[in-house]
Image: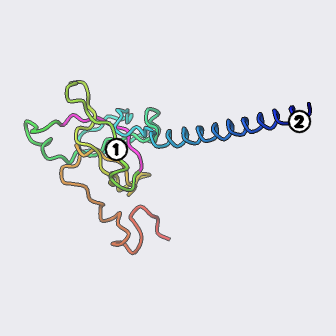
Amino acid sequence: MSAKVSAQSRHLLTAMVRVSVLGALLLTLAALGSMACEDNGIGRPCDVGADAGASQAVYNNQALECPSRTCLKPVDDNPCCSSVPPTCSCNTGPYCSAYCSKDSDCDGQKRDNGDNGDFRCQTGYACGVAFVVGPLCCKKLCLCKDFLGTGLLTPQICDPKLNNGRTACQPTP
């Protein structure tokens, strides 16, 4: 009788180990899957908390609607918006952004052209420098290409190779 109980205990223990290993594997896969599908909110409409014209860049680094907390409206350098009447759509509103190191970090929400009330970015996002002063000085952020009429370049003052290993944003020692 004790051999029978011992065999049942061994089978029960083996089954419990299998279930535990399977459970751990499923939890690991779920965690990895949620990281891969994380919505960083780039392109979501947000409030910069200020009224700014096309020639003024503004940001809000406490925007609760943005997972990164960064809402921005850069200077509108798009030449078609300065023509009268504008030759393209110039009504892109402030949007959630995030820090980046390359363009592929900047996949985000784009405008639904069938919705006249949708003011999200039309042309997609690129990684670049939006500000050369202040807390976001020379930091790379996801920028809406609607605002980039002349293309995206790193400003010279933000390039350490051209400034003795420093950027204009770093204090001098």
Which is closer to the viewer, label 1 or label 2?
2
Please name the residue that numbered disc 1 is placed on. 107
Which residue is painted at 45% across and 64% down in the image? 170
Which residue is painted at 21% across and 34% down in the image? 91
Look at the image and say whether residue 10 sits in the magenta stretch: no
Which residue is painted at 34% across and 44% down in the image? 107
Q: Give the range drawn in magenta.
A: 90-99
C-alpha gap between disc 1 and disc 2:
63 Å
Relative image position of residue 152 (x, y in whole percent): 25, 55
| Render colour scheme | rainbow
Q: Which amino acid does label 2 sit on?
A: Ala
Q: Vertically, is 137 above or below 92?
A: below
Relative image position of residue 164 (x, y in whole percent): 39, 75
Name the N-terminal-most of marks 1 and 2.
2
Q: Residue 57 carries which label?
A: none
Foreground residue, 166 or 30? 30
Foreground residue, 65 or 158? 65
Q: Which mark is residue 3?
A: 2
Relative image position of residue 48 (x, y in whole percent): 37, 36
